[in-house]
Image (cartoon, rainbow, N blue to C red):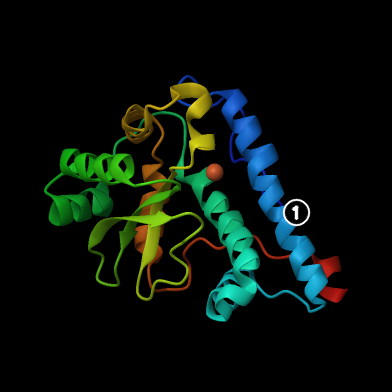
Amino acid sequence: MFALPDLPYEYDALEPTMSSRTLHFHHDKHHATYVKTLNELLSAKGKPADSLEAVIRQAAAAGEADKKLFNNAAQAWNHGFFWPSMAPGGKKPGGDLEAAIASSFGGVEKLREAFVKQGAEHFGSGWVWLVADKAGALSVRASHDAHDMVNVPGVTPVLVCDLWEHAYYLDYQNDRKGFLEAWFDSLANWDFAASQLAARGQGRAWRYPAQLADAKAA
Ligand code: FE2
């Protein structure tokens, strides 16, 4: 059985950019429901679940037969990665990350343009990601609905922002672009991004918390 990870900050820590009310609904209702449904589906299968990354890969390979499992597993993972992608404080990227941004985009302002544009123009629900390839080159990608970066070969996710309306509608209503600009300027966790970039291809990148021990034995 997979657990719902706690937020790595208080519910009001991201205000005013992201309200405590949004975080309560988003984490305690949306993410919690994905995790609950994931666990129910895995229990119904009657087989011991593996790591969440393995569950996602197996469900994706099964296609339509495991689409509901894939959607809930990938959404559980994506939200687990989204929480540490944010931090209060509005720091700026530094060190190797800043150099990689300069080399890949021409600077932080160009990355901001690309990230906000892809996120704002993405049709429907999904996610906008900053990812690194094996050589450390960075790029911005968007994914639809529950689709994640676990199944993308050679790619390490560095940061993600949730584009589903539940991520911003209480605070920004239909202004997704305004949300993305504020998110990039005030919430993007560049320390986490730097650790992901450094960990690429070494098996040390972020993973969803392991299952609870009692469920493994069940
Ligand atoms: Fe979400």
**Toward which corner of the image does residue 134 lie, by quadrant?**
bottom left
User: Please, is residue 176 above or below residue 106 in the view?
Assistant: above
- Measured along the vertical axis of the image, is residue 8 above or below residue 5? above
Residue 35 sits in quarter: bottom right
In the rendered image, is residue 3 in sight? no
Q: Position of residue 187 (x, y in %)?
A: 41, 33
Tell me if residue 64 can be seen: yes
Image quarter for ligand 1: top right
Q: Which residue is mark 1?
A: 36
**Residue under the point 14% across and 56% down:** 103
Residue 73 is situated, as x and y percent measured from the top left of the image, at 62, 62
Quarter that holds the C terminus: bottom right
Q: x and y percent of residue 165 in the render? A: 49, 36
The residue under the point 86% across, 67% down is 214
Measuring from the top left, give residue 49's x and y in whole percent.
73, 74
**Farthest-out residue, left:** 106
